[in-house]
Image (cartoon, coloured by chain):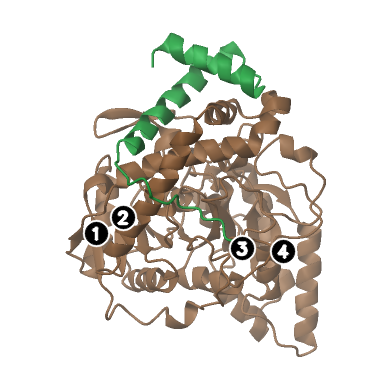
Amino acid sequence: MSTPDLDEFIAASARVLALPADPAWYPTIRFNLEVTFRLAALVADFQLPDDAEPAPVFRA
Amino acid sequence: MSDPAEASALDIARAVREGATTAGAVVEAALARIAALNPVLNAFTDLTADRARARAAAIDARRAKGEQLGPLAGVPFAVKNLFDVAGLPTRAGAKINRDLPPAARDSPLIERLEAAGAVLVGALNMGEYAYDFTGENVHDGPSRNPHDPARMTGGSSGGSGSAVAGRLVPLALGSDTNGSIRVPASLCGVFGLKPTYGRLTRARTFPFVASLDHVGSFARSVADLAASYDAMQGPDADDPVCAARPAEPAAPTLAAGLDGLRIATAGGYFRHGLSPEGHAALATVAAALGVTRAVAWPEAPRARAAAYVITCAEGAALHIDRLRTRAKDFDPAVRDRLIAGAMVPAGMVVQAQKFRRWYQARVLELFRDVDAVLLPATPCTAPRLGQDTFTLDGVELPVRANLGLYTQPISFIGLPVVAVPVPLAPLPIAVQIVAAPWREDVALRIAHALEERGAVRAPKPAGWSPPPGGGRSAA
């Protein structure tokens, strides 16, 4: 994602989530999102079957 | 017990039981060391001196009446300030939490240690809300490394590492979500135990990432680590994650030796970015154990990535109301990570949790062929306080996020680990001994064997001289 796209995402997400993201904080928030999205892509690249169970299992 | 600062927890307890000293004298000596050293180390944020003196007096009164004393009689200990201590607001390293009402009751782990005779003397500095690997805290100041107060303790249990390495107390509790016991144990040069996920109750501790949070202890000897662990085990209905299995004491088998244990190292990811000191520490430990076998650890980088994604999203979910109402009272670095975490799409988190299940199954297959794996604990020795980046394998990376490079893939699936300090000069660095789930006894046995062979120990910080009264002060 480009910097303007990410900044737009941050601004929209902050409005939707009612988070007080001051534009002065955007560079650090953007940096953290870039790292997280890069690492999430590494996880997403790993092919798992549709019936793969997530780790936390609720037990009634 | 010639030097109370150097005495182990078990030596103190024996001396108190035998009447060679009193719990009162031990506690006064600990309080004196804290008064002398904490202005430099900044390990303690709260002292419980009155409570400690009263408790010590009760222990001495029981002995005078001929009553049996517990295995940790008179042993001073302290806890990371995310453990509830009756009468104190549970800071969790945060300015915001200081507005909480005082805790009504101690954490059960404090209750269990005190039931064994230990004496709580205070609460310890930590990174804000445990989202930290450095030991720095903008509200309370950084905890400082006793081997060089200009260097990081590691975090987030920074005060715990500093207090034990600095000889303020022989025993401390911490928490570990992604490495927060093992990183400070490595940088401060003490032993740290992160038990199996669900082994020790987390009730009445301030959470961070519920699906990853563990609690454990720091000590300067393996026997002390095992004694504290044994005193804290057992089910607890107040923590739904705490296993319903009975206590499985590790101390009785500590000296069982290495016979029958299959131990290996792992290369690949766990060698990338490792400093020469980290390589030297691993080689020392492997040589002392005669380990030549190496195993292929599956998908460690992806496991670290998935742990990272779950951490930022779950952590953000925990704090979202505080972010909305008190954003400016957070450490800015923590705040911005949490705000970013609140924006992570749910699909990424679910995928990380699915991967986690797959990864756990593969790693458990590995443990059919080995009983323990030796891994580095941190990429390097303690960085300088305020240092933002370091260079690993020629790549400049942020210190804060990368000190836990080698610890995250392990806590991600809740494996038990003992971090053992290798006393390199001028700064120590630890190795992780990783065992199969519920086999803390195996990791502790190996750690004990290494200690017996002289390969690992909690080194005495250089540059300190004893002040009047038997304590230590900064040179």
**B199 or B420: which is nearer to us?**
B199
- The residue identified by callout 2 is B375
Callout 1: helix, strand or loop?
strand
Gap between marks 1 and 2 measured at Cα: 6 Å
Camera-nearest label, 2 or 4: 2
Within-10-Å neighbours for mark 2: few <14, some 14–19, many 20+: many
- The residue identified by callout 4 is B28
Classify residue B53 as left or right of residue A58. Answer: right
Query: Label 4 amino acid?
Result: Glu
Q: Chain B is drawn in which colour?
A: brown
Within-10-Å neighbours for mark 1: few <14, some 14–19, many 20+: many
Name, please, the residue furthest toward the bottom. Answer: B66
- The residue identified by callout 1 is B265
- Asked if marks 2 and 4 fall on the same chain, the answer is yes
* Res B33 quadrant in image: bottom right
First reached walking from the N terminus: tag 4 or tag 1:
4
Q: Colour of chain A?
A: green
| Residue B472 place in picture, x, y as percent | 58, 54
First reached walking from the N terminus: tag 1 or tag 3:
3
Query: Label 3 amino acid?
Result: Thr
Point out which mark residue B201 bears.
3
| Residue B368 place in picture, x, y as percent | 28, 69
B78 above or below B2?
above
| Residue B324 place in picture, x, y as percent | 69, 26
